[in-house]
Image (cartoon, rainbow, N blue to C red):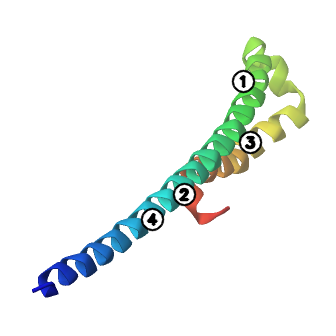
């Protein structure tokens, strides 16, 4: 007569164990989310730094474009930025933080 009760108790323990596993799974998900946010914030800080540096450079170059380009080093650096640095910045922006890079 007690057999159905025992079966219910065992089922409840099994259910509780599974639900406990879900609690820990959710905790791992939250930790992963926090790591993702931290990686995105770090990436954003790097992008902001690039933007600030490039803002200073473009302000200087646009205030007197002819004078700026008259200096061959400035012209070279402009070409380098457009050919290399902007490509690097694009890669950084498109980078998936879950890659760990």
Whole-Å distance between the Cαs marked 4 and 1?
Answer: 44 Å
**How far across and how far down the image is residue 41, in percent?**
63, 40
Looking at the image, residue 20 lies above or below residue 36: below
Looking at the image, residue 83 lies above or below residue 45: below
Q: Nearer the viewer, mark 4 or mark 3?
A: 4
Query: How many residues crowd around disc 4 within 10 Å: few (fewer than 14), some, or many (20 or more)?
Result: few
Quarter of the N terminus within the rendering: bottom left
Query: How many residues crowd around disc 3 within 10 Å: few (fewer than 14), some, or many (20 or more)?
Result: some
**How far across and how far down the image is residue 34, in percent?**
57, 49
Residue that carries the numbered disc 3 in the rendered image: 81
Could you tell me if the residues under marks 1 and 3 are in contact, i.e. CB atoms within 8 Å?
no
Answer whether residue 40 is visible to the viewer in this image.
Answer: yes
Q: Which mark is residue 25?
A: 4
Q: Nearer the viewer, residue 95 or 61?
A: 95
| Local SS, label 4 | helix
Q: Nearer the viewer, mark 4 or mark 1?
A: 4
Which residue lies at the image location 12% right of the left edge and 83% below the top edge? 4
Whole-Å distance between the Cαs marked 4 and 2?
Answer: 11 Å
Considering every residue shown, the one lying at the far left of the view is 1
Residue that carries the numbered disc 2 in the rendered image: 32
Q: Nearer the viewer, mark 3 or mark 2?
A: 2
Counting residues from the N terminus, which is met first, the one under dot 4 or under dot 1? 4
Residue that carries the numbered disc 1 in the rendered image: 55
Q: Nearer the viewer, residue 20 or 11?
A: 11
């Amino acid at each position: 007569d007690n057999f159905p009760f025992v079966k219910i108790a065992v089922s409840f323990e099994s259910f509780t164990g599974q639900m406990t596993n879900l609690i820990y799974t959710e905790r791992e998900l939250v930790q992963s989310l926090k790591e993702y946010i931290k990686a995105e914030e770090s990436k954003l800080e790097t992008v902001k730094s690039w933007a600030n540096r490039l803002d200073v450079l473009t302000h200087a170059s646009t205030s007197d474009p002819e004078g700026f380009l008259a200096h061959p080093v400035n012209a070279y650096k402009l070409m380098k930025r457009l050919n290399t640095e902007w490509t690097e910045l694009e890669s950084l922006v498109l980078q998936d933080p879950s890659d760990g890079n």
